[in-house]
Image (cartoon, rainbow, N blue to C red):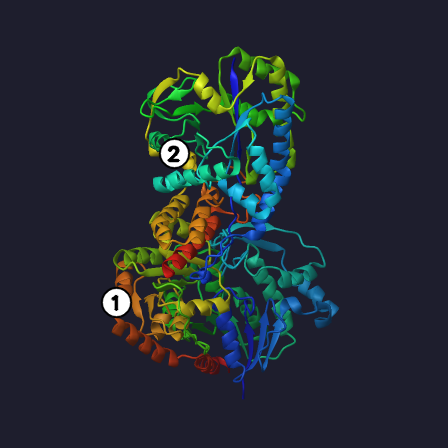
Amino acid sequence: MKPKVLMLGWEFPPEISGGLGIAFHAICKALAPLAEVTIIVPKLDKTVKIPGAEIIGIGEIDLDKFFEEEEIIKLEGMIKDNRIEIDVSPYPVYPLKTDVSVTTTTTTTTTATATKTVSRTPGDIHSLHKNFRDAELYGNEVVNMVRYFAEITELIASKLSFDIIHAHDWMTFEAGIRLKKKFGKPLILHVHSLNFDRVGPEQEGVVYQIEKDAFQAADMILPVSHYTGSIIREHYEVEPERISPVHNGIDPVKTFKTEKKFPEKLILFMGRITLQKGPEYFLETASKVIDKYPAVRFAIAGTGDQLNRLIEEGAYIEISQKLHFTGFLERKKVYSLLSMADIFCMPSISEPFGLTALEAVQFGIPVIITKKSGAAEVLPSAFLADFWDTDLMASQILSLLTDQNLYDSKVKEGKKDIQKISWNKTAENILKEYRKVIP
Amino acid sequence: MPAICFYFKAHCPYSIKKTSFFEFGQYPDLIDDEQNSRNISNLLKHNLRPSLEVLEDLIASSGGSFRFSMNVSGTLLDLVQYYLPSDYQSLSLFLKAKEIEPVISPYFSSAVNLLSFNEFLVQVRLHREKIYTLTGIKSGLFSNPDLTSNAGMADMIHKQQFRGMIMRAPAVKNGKISSGYIHRDQKFKNLKLILVNEKFLEIFLKAPFRKKNPDRQFLKKIVHEISRSRTLLILIPIDVHIADIQPESTARKLNFIKYFVEEAMDSGNIEFRKPSEVLTTNDPSVNLELSDKKDQIGSSYKNDTVLRKEAIRFLCSLEDKIKKAGDRELLYLWRIMQSTEHLDKMLLPENYDFFTGFPAYSMHEVYLEYMNALSCLDIYTRKNS
């Protein structure tokens, strides 16, 4: 019999700012034929559907039709008056003026910056609910949104039938805990990224605490890699028996090659331009490569709070003629860039998985990735390096640039690696974990 | 009798389009036609035409006693010629007036001297030719767009047989700047240096905005002060620049000048002269030796940023490639890139309104747009040469 899964997510297409949204959507899609899946997310574009799954967007439901009057009153009563303002941005969304423009949005610290009490008036639930439709998912109010999400989800869940709760990343963990407590169903936490990855081990703060509390309550934790699993074990003090890594998959894509309009080789960095992703190490590597092999160009695709600093650094070390910033790119442009690139480099300081590296391999690009990444566990063909070892990364790039046989063999091996990876396999592994905890 | 030499300056830079990484290799379609057409129309409507009308009226009402010098940049002339050809004819007629002395500067009115002395000379010659074609006058008067100068530049100008160079206070190795005198560096025998009087420059920039209508008493006071001194003045009361198109502000400046000129004429103690006229009458000049410090030929160096320096480095590196390619359109685009406002917007912001009216809102964004445009030009040039 198919298990009934209540899937709790934060990002859902088209509202995607990183790997979380892509992975969540792909997991739901792959699980839908294997389980009875009901998805609850804050915002939903009604045109986005998953065959076989029911999707509820909190911002889109009609509260008055969905709930009885007494339920709404109850819901309002449930919402506490304590509101926390927090400057946190787990997966920041950077608005863009145009295709090539960049912004100076800066949001990365994850410690609570202020706490205040705000009185609430009856009827707030309606405006609050409306917020889910209109507001950005990440911003100063994210912790409050997380709390409201938990409260409304609890009420919605009372009208649903499910065997297991599957919550993705810290924004949905509180909801998961509430449901577990109220309905007594097993809770699975899927970890796509940790506070630890984003800000390092030194800063703990609110998000860390939410994660830690949730890990204590969970029946099973599914990190996207063994690497992330080891962080959960060591830094969140979770016993290994409750940690079961499930690697991400990848969607098959019709890949293509585009002839570049310039003769130089193109080396690509793609991802949020934040400290976590190590863009400054990419720049340092670029400078070392250019010194020895000038016929190259480096492209940085993405945006983030470190962008301006990186632009200045590129100018300071005088490599700007060979360093290009594309800004945030839509999917189509991402593929277009991948179709032109010759080498992909992912020097993240901490990378739970690194879907972009898999996408690069799909496009027949040899990849150089950080040892501290989930992708390193599924791509044995990849060149590995410590994020700080820019000498090694530069020499790996140079060897690919100068040795065509090596280049071709890396492309070939990469394609073999990627054939073993799929979202269906991910879904099957998740299902196995479900079976372990469903009574 | 003290003489006043007015120096009016008109320039309009080109606007360039945004270019993305994905356009690299295509023809660098950098000129933003729509924006340029809008800019030049606004500039003429709100600034240049009213200014010329006032100046023409003053020439006429003074019976030709009101004389001055004027610099109209090559880019402004090109933009007018292309987008508003009928105005080009009027501008040509205006500049031909015998009361006006054209001032030559690098064609694109940029700090091209920072890029290459060779290119600097080419652009000076281009501007001189353009003005000659337009007015029939071979001007002997030069000014660098930001009025900076040093010994190296003076040498080049001297060799081009310019007789006078307008500048703001230069750094000197030996000698002293004396307010009100024509100066000369003996290394450049036939070139005289005409220094802007900073005090009156400041007055003419600020006074029109103190009160809505010109303060007659204040004007009398200035005229009196000038007539008592033997000071020779070079003023720049109007800088018709694209970033400063405000009808109200233009009207105030023009009103102030109009009343000042009338007051000065009425006093009978001041003359208005073209610079070339005072170069011959105001000898002996004060000797000094110009410094050759490089930072004296870029007025903005104090506010310079690592981004602007890198952008200029890239721009410079393209000179040989572009020139060897022998494509006139690409060369023109490269020169446009020297004078686009992007380079100014990479300086440290001067105030909160720094980016007002500009299609980018941070120096980083400006920089990326500029570097993308240069990359586009670079890649296309190499591909097609």
* Total count of labels: 2
> What residue is shown at x 54% (from left), y 81% (from top)?
A32
> What residue is shown at x 70% (from left), y 68% (from top)?
A63
In the orientation shown, which residue stands out farthest toward the right? Answer: A69
**Percent of width and height locating residue A60:** 66, 68
Question: Tag 1: residue type?
Answer: Thr
Q: Residues within 10 Å of mark 1 (few under 14, many from 20)?
A: few
User: B35 or B350, which lies in front?
Assistant: B35
Picture quadrant where residue A49 is located: bottom right
Q: Nearer the viewer, mark 2 or mark 1?
A: 2
Indicate the quadrant containing the C terminus of chain B: top left, top right, bottom left or bottom right: bottom left
Mark 1 falls within which chain? A
Question: Tag 2: residue type?
Answer: Ile
Do marks 2 and 1 share a subunit?
A: no
Image mark for residue B297: 2
Image mark for residue A402: 1
Picture quadrant where residue B122 is located: top left
In the orientation shown, which residue stands out farthest toward the bottom? Answer: A1
Q: Is residue B265 visible?
A: yes
